[in-house]
Image (cartoon, rainbow, N blue to C red):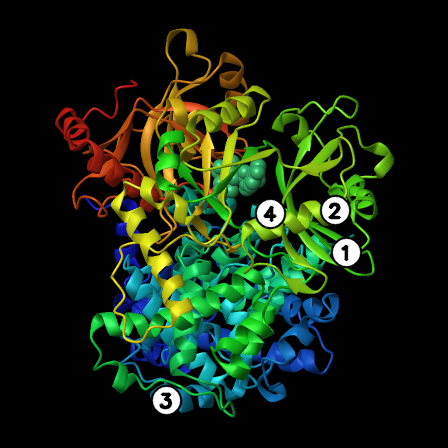
Amino acid sequence: MASPAKKRKLNNDPKLKATPARTLDHFFGKKNSGSSSKIDDSPVVAAENSEVTTSLTDEQLARKLQAEWDRESFGASTVWNGDSKERSDGISPKTPNEAIDETRLLSKQARKDIPDLDGIVATDSVAKPKTKNTLTLQAAGTAEDTLSSSIPFDQSPLTFDPSKYVQELQGHWAADGGNASYALLTRCFVLVNSTQSRIKIVDTLVNMLRVIIEADPDSLLPTVWLATNSISPPYISLELGLGGSAISKALKNVCGLDSKSLKALYDKVGDAGDVAFEAKKKQSFTLRKPKPLTIKGVYQSLVKIANTQGTGSGEVKQRIVDRLLQDARGAEESRYVVRTLCQHLRIGAVKTTMLIALSRAFLLSKPPGADFPLRSPQQLSTLKKEALAEVWAKPEEIVKACFAKRPNYNDLIPVLLEIGVCEELLIRCGLALHIPLRPMLGSITRDLSEMLTKLQGRDFSCEYKYDGQRAQVHCDDQGKVSIFSRHLELMTDKYPDLVDLIPKIRGDGVSSFIMEGEVVAVDQESGELKTFQALSNRARKDVAIGSVKVSVCLFSFDLMYLNGESLLSRPFRERRELLRSLFTEVPNRFTWVKSIDATSQDSETVLEFFKSATDIKCEGIMVKILDNLPNPNLIADVEDTEAADAIEKSARSKTIKKNAPENVPEKKTRRKALLATYEPDKRLDSWLKVKKDYSTTFDTLDLIPVAAWHGQGRKSQWWSPILLAVRNEDSGSLEAVCKCISGFTDTFYKANREFYNPGNENTLGSKPGYVEYEGGNPDVWFEPKEVWEMAFADITLSPVYTAAIGLVSEERGLSLRFPRFLKKREDKGIEEASTNEFLAGLWRKQEEKAPAAGAKGEIEGGEDDDD
Ligand code: ATP
């Protein structure tokens, strides 16, 4: 059976729509000739027409309104007598009076109240004073940009030729100041949304980006922001701050919906963007000619919304939202404008996809005037798959490396437009003080023995894994300090006590640095570690140093930048040495993570160390490779062939370099030797996590609770079982994976019931379209808000659950047996919950080890054993 997302996608088939815009002439022509048109077929329009014709024909009405406009330009005002009725389909037809008022409001009052709104769009459109007030009855739902909506962005970039469209598009955009239309971006979104294929998504983005690069490079930056569903990097706080009600109001204002029908539509489709799509489809016509949205204009409107604060800001924001929706041509534009406003674009163009697409686009296209070299698509199309993958790989690596060190499109895009993808990009877009780099991440290992096997032949450091908050501390030579979170948010204001500490820890030889560590709540007197919960009780914003109640200690573990120089390519042993020798400890406030150095031969010592970590409330240990090269004295101990291969390879290349022999064929190895460098944004085996939970259970998953049923017996007042889901990054949907009833305390159940109280903002009236679940009807649907860490016995193929469907089996999804709640991941947002891909990966890993377990699950089909 098709999943809701798939059904939705079928409805969105771009080939099924794209009705050309209808002009006033067309509209009257049809009416006058008495022939039926698609517009007339619509019940909404039919009703509208019949109502209007009781007093005047549409043509008479239009002429009359035109006269109104003309008189208005001379300062005269008129009153129209008409009455308003609300119809059963919920679309309230605008009386001419309302329509005039609304148009006036939008054209005059809105401009007056939002003084710089015109400034925002002024660059986007050439003023057309003569036609400004000209009335056109537009079939609002269908007035689309047919040129943009026919571009085959989903072709292979090696056959797609942007030059075919550039001139025509530029001609088309000339009336709007030469700025690329939002219709172009919408076209790309529609195509991306209509496929599940990662390759197609990347291809579509590449082609769209190429058209923008060649036709209107100035719109590239806003394009990238809009396509990645953001307006600024995480460390610059620019929040839209729009409540759901602003969007509902806009839908009512612009599409003429009443509250009841808006709710009915929302309950039916479950996504605000889809509601806008439906509403715009039903909307008969607007009296004000929409001013085509441009990519720049939409982006600038979002920035304006985010920057509008203080008294009256709600109204100003509302008018910008109304205006965006009103100017959206066609249902698809409305859908994506609303999804953008809700910050839930659901096109799967996440950061990595965008970076890949950018690297490829700049290999094939450049802006007019740039002189960096390009690759010829014709020549690339003659290459074999592997050779082509190699061509793509290098630029991809460069762009990703830049963004990992400096995660801001505002920095990346202008340089790309100037020099394309080349080594220089790494220098121009490198590490910088007060811009957070993306942190290096650790891979999970099940237990100590797996860790010891993986790191055979290497010297490594075992460090306590503290349970606090990761902090990246930047300090420049003027003493200015910035502190960033694991997710790159600026949190300097949260830790004034840490800022105060920096001059005390900075040794004499240190002018500037970037350091990383874990901030942990401690008892200031004894230094005893406190739990993560204690730390989360600290206020988050604008903390005054005198008001700090929860004392913290920074346990530092890395140094990435020192005195103007990046240390990322230095081995960990060296970075750690610099950290420990150049900085000064301050008791119970600043120190190094506790650590021991070991090899795989020291299993007893490592076990002792692990136990000591968990004894003092640490989560386990982090294990980090110390040197780039394996220790040659340890090679004999390596039994694992892969590791041996890797070690041998490194040892050989070392000898080869030293003795420089010619023509020595390199033996092919299956695995690259692990490096001890700091690799921003990478999760490598050179950092391994061993947690205490893992020593008793399997891997864990971070799932999102999406629905629940009323409990039975003792639990009748609470929600139990609770339905949990993984994320599908490609489609943006949440795929149900299991119901859970274990691991919850009564206190938890009680709080959970209060949090998800039907009717409040944490619950939904019905199943949202973005949740994939084919099982029985839950009693309540949750607004996805939380991430819960879950343990489980094993993963099974399921006939009921659709999680990861298509990744391990075409017909079956995956589910968990004996899922057990471990804890809420307060530190994770839902966009960081486990993905279907991750789940499929765990299943494959499990199958490699014990295929019988999965088969057993399949035969039993027993993922609902918690019921
Ligand atoms: P990840 O951060 O790896 O994506 P996660 O959010 O699930 O995964 P954990 O599994 O808890 O986090 O482990 C990683 C985190 O542990 C780091 O981000 C850091 O905040 C913390 N940490 C504590 N001690 C150390 C240490 N000695 N070295 C590195 N990280 C440490």
Q: Residues within 10 Å of mark 4 (few under 14, many from 20)?
A: few
Q: Is residue 663 above or below residue 316?
A: below
As helix, strand or loop, the secondary structure at mark 3 comes to helix
Q: Is residue 68 above or below residue 47?
A: below
For the residue marked with disc 3, what is the amino acid?
Ser
Can residue 111 be seen? yes
Give the label on residue 163, or none. Answer: 3
In the foreground, 649 or 253: 649
Measured in 3D between alpha carbons, the distance from the residue under mark 3 to the one under mark 2, in whole angstroms, is 57 Å
As helix, strand or loop, the secondary structure at mark 4 comes to loop
Res. 32 image quadrant: bottom left
Q: Residues within 10 Å of mark 2 (few under 14, many from 20)?
A: some
Whether tag 1 and tag 2 are in contact, CB under 8 A, the answer is yes
Residue 534, how many percent across, how many down? 67, 26
Whether tag 2 and tag 4 are in contact, CB under 8 A, the answer is no
Outermost residue toward the front? 659
Res. 154 image quadrant: bottom left
Instruction: Provide the residue designation for mark 4.
Output: 243
Q: Residue at x 71, y 59 (%)?
A: 308
Q: Nearer the viewer, mark 2 or mark 4?
A: 2
Instruction: Provide the residue designation for mark 2.
Output: 583
Measured in 3D between alpha carbons, the distance from the residue under mark 4 to the one under mark 3, in whole angstroms, is 42 Å
Measured in 3D between alpha carbons, the distance from the residue under mark 1 to the one under mark 4, in whole angstroms, is 46 Å
Give the label on residue 510, or none. Answer: 1
Outermost residue toward the top? 714
Outermost residue toward the left? 859
Q: First in sequence: mark 3 or mark 2?
A: 3
Res. 795 image quadrant: top left
Can residue 55 be seen? no
Outermost residue toward the right? 546
Q: Residue at x 30, y 24 (%)?
A: 793
Give the side of residue 588 with respect to residue 165, left or right: right
